[in-house]
Image (tube, helix red, strand yellow):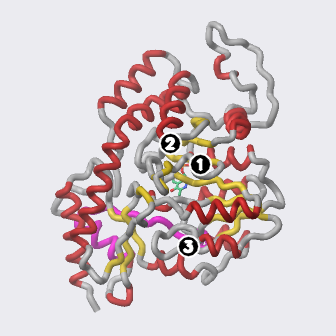
Amino acid sequence: MSETFLPYCRPDLGPEEIDEVVETLRSGWLATGPRCKQFEERLREYVGASHAVAVSSCTAGMHLALAAAGIGPGDEVITTPLTFCSTVNVVIHRGATPVLADICLDDYNLDPAEVERRITPRTRALMPVHYGGQPCRMDELLEIARRHKLLVIEDAAHAVGARYRDRPVGSLGDVTVFSFYVTKNMTTGQGGMVTTEDGDLAAQVRLLSLHGMSHDAWRRYEALGSWYYEVTAPGFNFAMTDVQAALGLGQLSRLECFQELRARYAAEYHRLLGDLEDVILPSARPEVRHVWHLYPVRLRSERLTIGRAEFIEALRERGIGTSVHFIPIHYHPYYREGFGFRKGDYPRCEQVFEGLLSLPLYPLMSMDDVARVAEAVREIVGAHRR
Ligand SMILES: Cc1ncc(COP(=O)(O)O)c(C=O)c1O
């Protein structure tokens, strides 16, 4: 490798986060507490929601949302095959059945017509995933949900800060769940947030996130807190900690700067690679604010003598890390064997996946890094044209 390795992603942690974390450590309050409250309030305001509950991960938040909504055995939940496994795992952990619907070819998000085709009398909820930071076609999905009386739980792991028809993700569907995992647009190491307009549902998510203990149990170690609490449901240990929230407060204060850089780098990739006919670049629909969590490109295998795996290896040899988002759900043995999904069931997802890989895109990169990646892509493609 001639140049330093450019990883697929790296979190940008500055003095804001470090100061917030140190202050929290000094405060002695490490578990769920006042920092979580502050972070909830700030994120709630940022996305324009009525309620926010900080949780230990997006996965935990989706699990809690399904549990709070009473979704369980006998119920079906429709989502996309082009997602991370946890979107589907939480449905399975509830004893419900995941149902997959194919995606659109322009944004790789759920196709509302395909969703409608998969609805049965057992369908209870839709779980749209805002793939790569681009909001789904929410008007259509919400209209289908209203007509069939379904709950909409958005997996917004990629989409903090995104907007749909000028409305922030987090205040569109019934429940939205964000991820602050280390690769995401803002991070708390691990962490997530559930937002909703429904106060009862928020209260239930909060209760279940803290073992099912009555709502202010986290205050029980304070001077004015009470030792007494009641368990009203079999809950989970899924709440966020104050150390995570401290990181989140610092990151949230810088999020708009991060988004600006992401948008600039995405535009630069477009400019530098836009004329390449062998690669399909991602695009943003006009009615959305795309937050470019990912920059997924697709190799056109019919024009190239190199496959995706060799392409990834060739980039690695040039010191460039990549990733693949995602191996479709129905390609994994567990879901195939457990739910009867088969290759061939979701042709558009399969077509997109064939040459799919994500190029590095994150605020700690420089414009020179973007140029270096684009140059490497051009070189490899140029050397392997049919
Ligand atoms: C689409 C999607 N949903 C859910 C998750 C899970 O998020 P978390 O790691 O916060 O549980 C991820 C990735 O981490 C993801 O990419």
Residue at image position (48%, 56%) is 165
User: In this picture, is 121 found above or below 187?
Assistant: below
The kind of residue tagged 3 is: Ile
Looking at the picture, how far across and down is residue 237, in whole percent?
A: 66, 35
Q: Are marks 2 and 1 in contact (CB under 8 Å)?
A: yes
Query: Which image quarter holds the N terminus?
Result: bottom left
Helix, strand or loop at label 3? It is loop
Is the shortest distance between ligand 1 and the CB of mark 1 under 8 Å? no
Q: For the residue carrying disc 3, how many other residues have a C-alpha within 10 Å: few (<14), some (14-19), or many (20+)?
A: many
The kind of residue tagged 1 is: Thr
Q: For the residue carrying disc 2, how many other residues have a C-alpha within 10 Å: few (<14), some (14-19), or many (20+)?
A: many
* In this rendering, position of residue 201 left or right of residue 303: right
Residue under label 1: 176
* In this rendering, position of residue 274 left or right of residue 245: left
Q: Are marks 2 and 3 in contact (CB under 8 Å)?
A: no
The kind of residue tagged 2 is: Val
> In terms of image quadrants, where is residue 52?
top right
- Reading the chain from its start, which is encountered first: label 2 or label 1? 2
Q: Which residues are magenta?
A: 309-332
**Label placed on residue 47:** 2
